[in-house]
Image (spheres, rainbow, N blue to C red):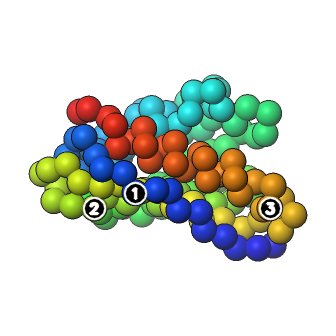
Amino acid sequence: MAKFTINSETNKTVSSIKDLYNFLSDFKNFGTILPEDKVQDFKYSENECSFTIKGITEMTIIVEEKVTNDFILFSSNGLAKFNFSLKVQFMGDAEAPGECKIDLLGDLNPFIKAMAEKPLGNLVNTMSLKLSQLTL
């Protein structure tokens, strides 16, 4: 297995850091930053969300750690071959627009990692961009 980190681009936000943090803290909103063409069957509860990445697998996401207006660390739950963490970071004054970025941290077979690196990079960049463009 090979540990890896994929960092999204840093994007300027339209909404305040506080509003984005509160929005993403509610699992019902997590689906709004996922790429619609790659995800289906999005479901959520107070403590987790689950969805299927088309053609790959179903996954469940839980919150591992939160620091108000700074970051939310999500982690996968129940995946045998690919466990990961997704760190959504907010930078700037809580009451004003700022910046956001998303880091994906995981552990994969080196062969699969080589094939998955570009699509995973596209995923975190899409999520970060969609989050930055939300008007709340």
* Disc 3 residue type (three-letter): Ala
Check the image and name the residue furthest to the bottom. Answer: 2
Q: Name the spot of residue 93 as percent of width and height, x first.
A: 16, 59
Closer to the camera: disc 1 or disc 2?
1
Residue at horizontal 56 percent and vertical 33 percent from the top? 35
Q: Report the Cα–Cα distance between label 1 and label 3.
A: 23 Å
Q: Report the Cα–Cα distance between label 1 and label 2.
A: 9 Å
| In this view, 85 is above or below 13 | below
Q: Is mark 1 on a helix, strand or loop?
A: loop
Q: Name the spot of residue 44 as percent of width and height, x first.
A: 51, 33
* Disc 2 residue type (three-letter): Met
Left or right, residue 57 beside residue 134: right
Tell which circle, 1 or 3, labels the residue nearer the N-terminal end.
1
* Disc 1 residue type (three-letter): Thr
Label 1 close to label 3 by CB (< 8 Å): no
Q: Which circle marks residue 10 in the picture? A: 1
Tell which circle, 2 or 3, labels the residue nearer the N-terminal end.
2
Check the image and name the residue furthest to the left. Answer: 95
Q: Is mark 2 on a helix, strand or loop?
A: strand
Query: Where does the N terminus fall, quadrant-wise?
Result: bottom right
Left or right, residue 17 beside residue 103: left
Q: Name the spot of residue 25 as percent of width and height, x first.
A: 35, 46
Residue at horizontal 45 percent and vertical 32 percent from the top? 32
Q: Report the Cα–Cα distance between label 2 and label 3.
A: 30 Å
Q: What element carries label 3?
A: helix
Residue position marked by numbered label 2 in the rendering: 91
| In this view, 83 is above or below 32 | below
**Number of on-image labels:** 3
Residue position marked by numbered label 3 in the rendering: 114
Label 1 close to label 2 by CB (< 8 Å): yes
- Please tell me how crowded label 3 is: few (under 14), some (14-19), or many (20+) other residues with Cα within 10 Å: few
Left or right, residue 72 beside residue 96: right
